[in-house]
Amino acid sequence: MVFVVALAFADAAGAQDWPWSDSSLPPVQRAQMALDQMTEQEKLSLVYGVIAAPWGGKPKPSGSIGSAGYVAGVPRLGIPALQETDAELGVSNPGDVRPGDTATAMPSDLALASTWDPEIARLQGQSVAIEARAKGFNVLLGGAANLIRDPRGGRNFEYFSEDPLLTGAMAGSMIEGVQSRHIISTIKHFALNAQETDRVVLNARIDPAATRESDLLAFEIAIERGRPGAVMCAYNQLNGSYCCENDWLLNQVLKTDWRYPFFVMSDWGAVHSTVRSAMAGLDQESGEQLDTQNFFEGPMARAIAEGELPEARLDDMARRILTSIFAHGLADKASASEPVDFAGADRTALAIAREGTVLLKNQGLLPLSADTRKIVVIGAHANLGAPSGGGSSQVMPRGGIAAKEQLGKNRAMIFDPGSPLEAIRLQFPRARVDYDDGSVAPRAAKAAADSDAVILFVDQWMTETADAPNLSLPGEQDRLVEAVTQANPRTAVVLETGGPVLMPWLAQTAAVLAAWYPGQKGGEAIAEILSGAANPSGRLPVTFPISEGQLPHPKIQGDPDGAPIGPVGRGGHYGAMFTGVYDEGAAVGYKWFVERAEPPLFPFGFGLSYTRFALSNLAVDVSGRTVTASATVRNLGDRTGAATPQFYVSGPKSANIRLRLVGWDRVELKPGEDRQVIVSIDSRLFARFDEDARKWRIQPGVYRLTAGFDSQQQELAASFELQSASLPP
Ligand code: GLC
């Protein structure tokens, strides 16, 4: 993969005209010029960072804004400090370290991925980056590209999809949007951080070639498209070696095969050595208070002095960091922050929630008629707001949190403002719209029986550091849904969850919407879809199983009921390692269901609309190594809607490619309108990875391309022939 370092275009000199301030020079040249002036101590100051908050009795580091991370710069040479903030779903404010500071709470990445619209992902990245810069941040710890390997994964709401192409496209576009505002985006968590429980003592065991075709392909595509200025290595071990000291992962795959020119930072508390991790490709220790000791300051100086670590490696670490700083405009005057357009941020948040809500079932209920006289809204604090996920991505939303449900010690479900109930009342001005909190099922059922229609909200709190023990709705919510739908089948269930859930009551409810964590404009979006003001267009980025027995791991690996073992800090120790065996390999999500011929509850790519679409004229064009697919999509209904025709490929027996998403487009069509969609297909998607040769290999033979509106419903098929070929990694 060829990597051309993007030049930071900005006007001439920075604050002071050091030779390296000339932004017309290539970033790597500017980096070398600055590096040549640095003392060893100044180089060391670049390669480790701290949590920028009061810690161990000390105040937050002077010069830091207050956030997850701070890396001192080199003021003597005009090298800025790195002010690092989590901002996957909006700019976070951990522990209210910046008292009262709030930010726009965007919908979850699952909602963003459900749009299948990379452009809106770019807008989200851009919008969040503008808010981050306005607060003084220049590194955004966001651009999560882990595959959703296990639907019970605690951070699935921060991830995009089970498919590497969809994940890579969406994460890459988000990263591109972030970096368009002269801020470094950090793709994370590299790699196989597929579950949260005991993530720091998880040894993820998986076939290397399968890793290349799944989790690593998502990162590779996202890095190609977004060019993130930093990569964050993950907590877990990969095949017996911690990711942050994994030579195969960092030096061979990322820096050699993919020719990545910027730097690798650790996750917070994910460093376990000085020489081993530096030599394996780690360039910066993050949040060093969470490590059992500092590894990259004093111990690194000693290792160099004692000849254990070549000074040249420290130079390479510092050079990579400086190259990223210069390439993304952090040291250039021109990239001063810009005013925040909060109305624009709200428009982006609303568009994501609107386009990311997936209509899963609709038996003649939605959109609700404007003449509906009596509606009852039930459950999930829908009178106040919408749930969000826990952990480092948590945003303190503008306007303040709407509700907080304590779930245990340091575990509270935070609700973003934007009351669905109030939004529904606005959409149905002629209706009486009541609310019941759903805490007493018989009372809720009575309210349902007395209404013309029921909007029943259910939620599932997910968080960093803990996986869901199962896929059932938490608490008594399944019984609540059963009681309410028994009392009135004209019920629309709105899922506000952190991933797929089981629905034992599905047959007895008229409609189901997957709204995920919809952010602080989510209430509005849900109400618009219920009334038909917006036509739902979301498509599932993850498979919804009928039962956990269908999954590669019917019980999630590790001990979700055990006390989570997190980064331990000084003097702590990590518990016993456990091995998570990912023997499904690259068969993640729908690929597993297809391989096992298992029918899902709702398939990857699925989503209904208030109109209907048809697909025709599938054609495949093979010229040399370029394969292009096209088809015509038509709106057969009586209202405008957006369709997402999807293209999949399966290969000859020799290739053993059962089904892979190879392209899609999202098109908005008026009634009767049709449009041809054309996708050019990344050749790697026809290939298997040969780890020994470190090459992609395309087997010769007849390949089958299908087109449809989800991974199961493939209406059209065409065959084409490919010659044998090898591609660079
Ligand atoms: C966390 C997360 C990572 C986050 C970092 C800083 O433990 O794994 O996503 O960016 O620490 O908060």
Image: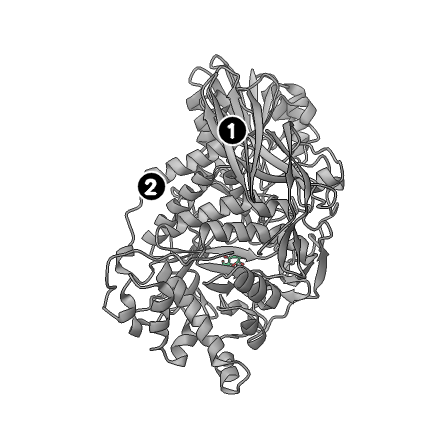
- Residue 309: x percent and y percent? 53, 80
Q: Residues within 10 Å of mark 1 (few under 14, many from 20)?
A: many
Is 162 left or right of 77, judged from the image as shown?
A: right
Front-most of residues 712 and 489: 712
* Quarter occupied by residue 19: bottom left
Q: Is residue 225 above or below residue 291?
A: above
Q: CA distance from mark 1 to mark 2?
A: 25 Å
What residue lies at 28% left-to-right and 66% top-to-bottom? 21
Front-most of residues 190 and 291: 190
What residue lies at 65% left-to-right and 44% top-to-bottom? 151
* Mark 1 or mark 2, earlier in chain: 2
Residue 369 visible, this angle = yes
The residue to which callout 2 is attached is 342
Q: Is residue 682 above or below residue 430?
A: below
Secondary structure found at label 1: loop
What residue lies at 56% left-to-right and 64% top-to-bottom? 250
- Residue 213: x percent and y percent? 63, 51
Secondary structure found at label 2: helix
Q: Identify residue type, mark 2.
A: Phe
* Quarter occupied by residue 437: top right
Front-most of residues 130 and 518: 130
Residue 413 visible, this angle = no
Q: Identify residue type, mark 1.
A: Ser
- Residue 78: x percent and y percent? 29, 69
The residue to which callout 1 is attached is 537
Is 527 left or right of 398, judged from the image as shown?
A: right
- Residue 382: x percent and y percent? 51, 32
